[in-house]
Each structure stands twice: as C-alpha cells, then as structure tokens.
Image: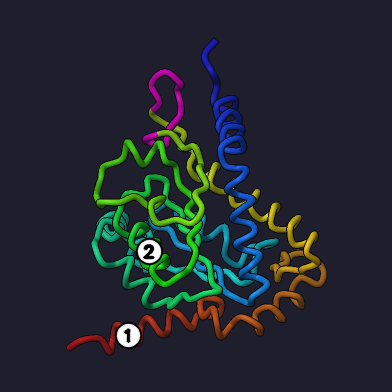
Amino acid sequence: MPEIFPERVRALLDELDARSAKAISTAAALLLDTVEADGIVHVAGSGHSLALVFETFYRAGGLALVRPMWDPAVLPLPDALRSTRAERQEGLGRTVVQAASPAPPDVAVVFSTSGRNPYPVEIAQECAALGVPVIAVTSPKASIRAAARTETMLADHATVVIDTTVPPGDVVHPAGAPRTAAVSTILASYAWSRLLADLDDLAAERGVEPPRWVSANVPGGDAVNRGLLERYRHRIPELTGAAEVLSSFHRQAGPQ
C-alpha cells in the first residue's frame, strides 16, 4: 500500500529527531548563553521562510528577546515576484545585517530550506564575521539539489546546523512522484518548538528564567507582556512600529 501523507510527515519528523537532536541541544545552549548575557536573538528568513520568523517573534511561549532581521522586499504578500528577486539580489542580506547591527553576546537564527540564495547566505556570513554565532535551520539534502546562486551555502557559515530533513523540491505527495503538500514549514516549526523545549529544560537546570511572551488571551497575559515590552521596546523597535517609522525615514532621506 502506498505511503500516505501523514505517515510521510511522521517519518520525516522522526528523521529530524534522529539527525538533529544533538544540534538542537547545542543550539539551546547558545540561546541560553545569550539570554543569560542579556543579548538579542536575531532571526532571519525570506519568502515562505518568513513564516518561521513569525513563529519566533512576539509569540505566546516564545522568547521576548527575539528581533526579526529582514527587509520588506522579501515578503511575498505585497509582491510575490519582487520577493523572489530580492532573495536572489546580491548585497541585500549584508545591508540587513548592517542595519540590525548584531554583536556578541547576540546570536542569529537563519531559516532557509535550500540555503542557496544570496540573502540568507549573506546574513549568515556577515553575522559570523561579526563574531555572532549562527544557528542555521536548513536542509542539506535540499541545498545540494538546489540551484547554486552563491559560491557557498548557508550551512557553511553556521556554528550549528539543524537539519530539517526537507526533501529537494519540498513537496512529498504522492510518494512515487511528489507534486504537492510542502513540508518545510511543518518541519522547521517543529524544530524551533523542540529547540524552545530544550532551552526550557536547560534553563531550569541552570536556575534561569528566560523572558517569555504569554498569550494575551489568558488572565494576566497582558500585564506580563507590558513588562516585557517596556524592557525590550528600545532594543527591538519592531515591537512598537518604531522600525517602520525609521525605515520610512531612511527611504525618504536616502541618497539624492
């Protein structure tokens, strides 16, 4: 009997656990070092990998010290074709890192299934050059089969590589000739949630309480989140819209 979609996803999740358990544990330790040193977790992705940036930022149960590191041009919603051009544009990733100015004890997390477009590769490369550890959430087997638009891959610049096990082309159904049912978001989201779980266990061992967002839909959530907003609003301008205002100012006051 042909393998059905739920079985294929469960098999890939098991493969991710087997391949990346150690890497996720190492990444959790890097994140906790940043938490203890009062640093910032800079998170990047482009195209549909931005879904993972959304998953990390301002999310119930998520770390409050996460800052999205991105350029609006890589968001598909207002202009899908522009987003594809942007992630293939040389120099944009470097510009994004320069604007965010990460520095130790910060850490960077870069999501990219293929890891072969200039945008995520440059972000990882620039962060590493600044002494900022890079956690790459990517699929080496997808990278090998992807179009080579850069001399190196995202994984080449990473301190830790979390293998999401996403197959080349992303789709997995039907099993014999896959053409639909992409799994990259499912697998990368799971990897991030498992990373947070490992971080929580390690933090408990060290007696550390990471700053976490609480759902606004539970009693007391708004009060907890107000305190976190006050603590991080000046270091993470995206929390209050200040980043959009600053970006607009730079566009208007740019080179004449």
Q: Earlier in the sequence, mark 2 or mark 1?
A: 2
Residue drawn at the location 81% of the way across and 72% of the way down: 220
Where residue 94 appears, as percent x and y from the top left, is: 32, 69
- Magenta-highlighted stretch: main secondary structure? loop
Q: Nearer the viewer, residue 76 or 92?
A: 92
Q: Nearer the viewer, residue 82 or 16?
A: 16
Location of residue 225 (image quadrant): bottom right
Residue at the far left: name it. 256
Residue drawn at the location 66% of the way across and 56% of the way down: 196
Is 232 displayed left or right of 98 in the figure? right
Where residue 171 appears, as percent x and y from the top left, is: 42, 33
Q: Which mark is residue 135?
A: none
Question: SS class of the residue under badge 1?
Answer: helix
Residue drawn at the location 66% of the way across and 62% of the way down: 62
Where residue 29 appears, as percent x and y from the top left, is: 64, 59
Q: How is the image coloured?
A: rainbow
Q: Nearer the viewer, residue 103 or 177?
A: 103
Residue at the far top: name it. 1
Q: Nearer the viewer, residue 9 or 102?
A: 102
**Region rendered in magenta:** 168-178
Q: Magenta includes 173? A: yes
Whether residue 32 is situated above or below residue 101 in the rendered picture: above
Q: Which mark is residue 250?
A: 1
Picture quarter with the N terminus? top right
Is 38 displayed left or right of 12 in the figure? right
